Amino acid sequence: MEATKEHCAYCFDVLLAHLSRTGPQSRITATFDNRSKDYPLFVTWQKKSSAGDEERLRGCIGNFSPMRLDSGLREYALTSALRDTRFHPIALNEVPRLSCSVSLLTDFEDADDYMDWEVGVHGVWIEFQTPNGRKKTSTFLPEIAEEQGWSKIETIDHLLRKGGYELTITDEFRRSTKLTRYQSQKAHLSYDEYTVLRKPSRATGP
């Protein structure tokens, strides 16, 4: 299955129902097929700048455990919008400037080493241990390194910092990480596109 704009529209449905308090999100009807296999997934919210010339990250959280699409999107539409600790929770008056992306993750493979992946093709998920023995993980979706213009080494270093590693990053430490590579199916929908999709239909079930 490919990620679709309808998956993104469902995330808008869920977020709007929560923020406007129009009813339980569990009552929202999914119009996409839930009979296919479960997927690990991420939901990403971005917000247009005040000038409207660029989008900035507003929240991105997901799960590497396969989930049924309706319940997974319902959960992470809200988690990424309200509980990404890098940002304050999204407010209702921000929604018209939002866009939503849904990434369905596929093709997980253990890499031979931290360089065994391709920028623009693979997402990367690393596991590492801090000096006090704590296990940490960190991930970037497949598009991130290419969008930022990072090399493979720069991507790994950003992942280590994102995961909370604060010491000097050496090549020896990079080699100690365990890397899993994966791919994704991604769909993107702006709020303007969402309003077109939802007119004159509904956002909630009976």
Image (spheres, rainbow, N blue to C red):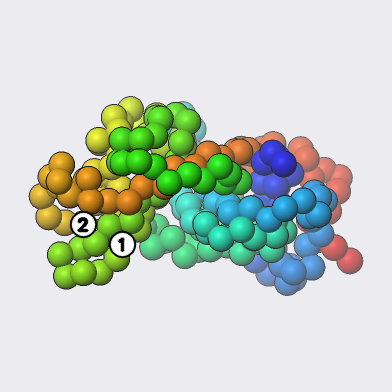
Picture layout, residue 100 above or below residue 62: above
Picture layout, residue 4 above or below residue 38: above
Q: Position of residue 65 (x, y in %)?
A: 56, 60
Residue at point 43%, 60% (across, down): 84
Residue at point 47%, 53% (across, down): 59
Q: How many C-alpha atoms fall within 10 Å of the one at disc 1: few (<14), some, or many (≥20)?
A: some
Quarter of the image containing the N terminus? top right
Q: Which residue is mark 2?
A: 165
In this view, which residue lies farthest toward the left? 168
In this view, which residue lies farthest toward the front? 112
Q: Position of residue 134 (x, y in %)?
A: 25, 69
Contact flag, marks 2 and 1 (Cβ < 8 Å): yes
Q: Position of residue 152 (x, y in %)?
A: 30, 33
Q: Disc 2 versus disc 1: distance between alpha carbons?
A: 9 Å
Q: Which amino acid is tagged 1?
A: Lys
Q: Tell me if I can see residue 141 in this picture.
A: no
Q: Is residue 182 left or right of residue 111?
A: right
